């Protein structure tokens, strides 16, 4: 069966909430994907920053196959070995204290919001607390996550959303201070804004936010769903700032393809927030998901993924900077590590993404005018060169 037939069948049966590209992907190897027609694509999107290890890693695949033969699901009414192993490794690498595994990044955001509100409720017995979020942020598409997503386009059709949310400007500390009241219980922000256009937090801004939170007993929630798990050159992006959150959310590369997310709490928050009965999940943290997380941490260590990102990302930055210097319609590059964006002016960025796909290159957009590069973390300098060649052909 060819691509046209598969696409027609999908359109007949699948709710049309995505404008999918006319490609039917079938398999992957290394940093390349292949469609059902046999055409190969150099992947600089990684399933939206998910497939950090590249495709076809045999150790990863074998670990999942082994767990499938053991047990896939038990529910959270019982313990299982992969849960302990995955949680210990996430706690160790984050330097935080307690983990709750979810099925997605959006669910991790929901749990973080609940933990913050419960912390404040236990502190003063009130249930009218407020959360400060950032304009141009993105935290997910459920009602709670939409409520703290600073983009009216995503929100307008789904009002009324969760109340008690105020918005400040990212990297503008004065705008944050202007929103703080006695009711503020948490601040939530991405350490590197992703969908909003690849904006890293300024060190002074993040440190200033942390100081406000410590002074007023406000919880700091850092969303590391896209920028975490080695992508920026450290296990988690906030570790480069010396600013530890009270709650961190992560997902995407945490499972490298298996649907899994987590919110992670420091000791202060874990001891005075959620208790049995407050929060739950049927599938979250099941044996298959936790086996994936555990093996991902092992492979990140054995393959020295974080160190590799530190080595290869300056080369990607250099080549993208050269593109910006060369083409008038490219006006800036920004990002951290292997989470990079190039600003496009004078032409729709979506046209470039589509043309690149025709030329066997997968890249993404971020917002209305940014070309986004979030490749598997195993890319080499030669992969960067090939990406530049195909991208320039697309220009």
Image (tube, rainbow, N blue to C red):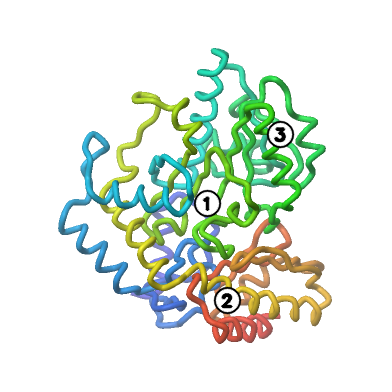
Residue 363 location in percent, x, y? 59, 70
Q: Which mark is residue 349?
A: none
Q: Earlier in the sequence, mark 1 or mark 2?
A: 1
- Quadrant location of the C terminus in the rendered image: bottom right
Q: Secondary structure at mark 1?
A: loop
Q: Which residue is nearer to you in this view: 375 or 250?
A: 250
Residue 25 location in percent, x, y? 42, 71
Which residue is disc 3 drawn over? Answer: 212
Instruction: Tell me if mark 1 has few (under 14), some (14-19) or many (20+) residues whose alpha carbon lies within 10 angstroms of its own.
Output: many
Q: Earlier in the sequence, mark 1 or mark 3?
A: 3
Does 62 sit above or below residue 383? Answer: above
- Quadrant in the picture for residue 76: top left
Q: Which mark is residue 225?
A: 1
Does 157 sit above or below residue 295? Answer: above
- For the question of whether residue 152 can be seen, the reply is no
Instruction: Tell me if mark 3 has few (under 14), some (14-19) or many (20+) residues whose alpha carbon lies within 10 angstroms of its own.
Output: some
Q: Are marks 1 and 3 in contact (CB under 8 Å)?
A: no
Q: Which mark is residue 311?
A: 2
Residue 17 location in percent, x, y? 52, 50
Residue drawn at point x = 61 percent, y = 67 percent: 337
Outermost top residue: 125
Q: Secondary structure at mark 3?
A: helix
Does 30 sit above or below residue 198? Answer: below
Horizontal side, residue 386 vs residue 330: left or right = left
Q: CA distance from mark 1 to mark 3?
A: 24 Å
Residue drawn at point x = 67 percent, y = 58 percent: 198
Residue 243 location in percent, x, y? 63, 47
């Amino acid at each position: 069966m060819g691509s046209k037939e598969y696409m027609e069948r999908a359109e007949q049966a699948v709710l049309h909430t995505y404008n999918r590209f006319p490609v039917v992907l079938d398999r992957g190897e290394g940093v390349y994907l292949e469609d059902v027609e046999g055409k190969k694509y150099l992947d600089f999107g990684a399933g939206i920053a998910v497939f950090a290890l590249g495709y076809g890693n045999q150790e990863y695949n074998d670990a999942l196959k082994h767990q499938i033969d053991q047990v896939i699901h038990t529910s959270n009414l019982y313990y299982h070995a992969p849960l302990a192993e995955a949680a210990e490794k996430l706690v160790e690498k984050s330097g935080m204290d307690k983990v709750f595994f979810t099925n997605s990044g959006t669910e991790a955001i929901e749990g973080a919001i609940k933990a913050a509100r419960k912390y404040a409720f236990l502190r003063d017995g009130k249930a009218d607390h407020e959360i400060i979020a950032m304009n141009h942020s993105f935290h997910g598409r459920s009602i709670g996550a939409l409520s703290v997503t600073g983009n009216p386009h995503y929100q307008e059709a789904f009002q009324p959303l969760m109340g008690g949310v105020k918005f400040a400007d990212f990297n503008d500390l004065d705008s944050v201070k202007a929103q703080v009241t006695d009711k503020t219980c948490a601040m939530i922000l991405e350490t590197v804004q992703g969908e909003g256009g690849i904006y890293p937090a300024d060190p002074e801004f993040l440190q200033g936010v942390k100081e406000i939170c410590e002074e007023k007993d406000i919880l700091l929630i850092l969303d590391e769903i896209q920028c975490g798990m080695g992508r920026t050159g450290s296990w988690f992006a906030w570790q480069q700032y010396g600013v530890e959150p009270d709650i961190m959310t992560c997902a995407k590369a945490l499972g490298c393809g298996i649907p899994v997310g987590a919110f992670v709490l420091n000791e202060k928050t874990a001891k005075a927030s959620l208790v049995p009965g407050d929060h739950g999940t049927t599938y979250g943290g099941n044996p298959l998901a936790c086996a994936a997380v555990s093996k991902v941490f092992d492979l990140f260590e054995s393959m020295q993924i974080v160190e590799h990102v530190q080595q290869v990302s300056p080369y990607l930055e250099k080549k993208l900077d050269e593109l910006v210097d060369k083409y008038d319609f490219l006006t800036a590059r920004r990002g951290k590590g292997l989470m990079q964006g190039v600003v496009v002016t004078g032409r729709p960025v979506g046209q470039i993404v589509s043309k690149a796909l025709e030329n066997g290159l997968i890249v993404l957009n971020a917002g209305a005018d940014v070309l986004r590069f979030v490749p598997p973390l195993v890319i080499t300098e030669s992969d960067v060169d090939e990406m530049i060649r195909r991208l320039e052909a697309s220009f």
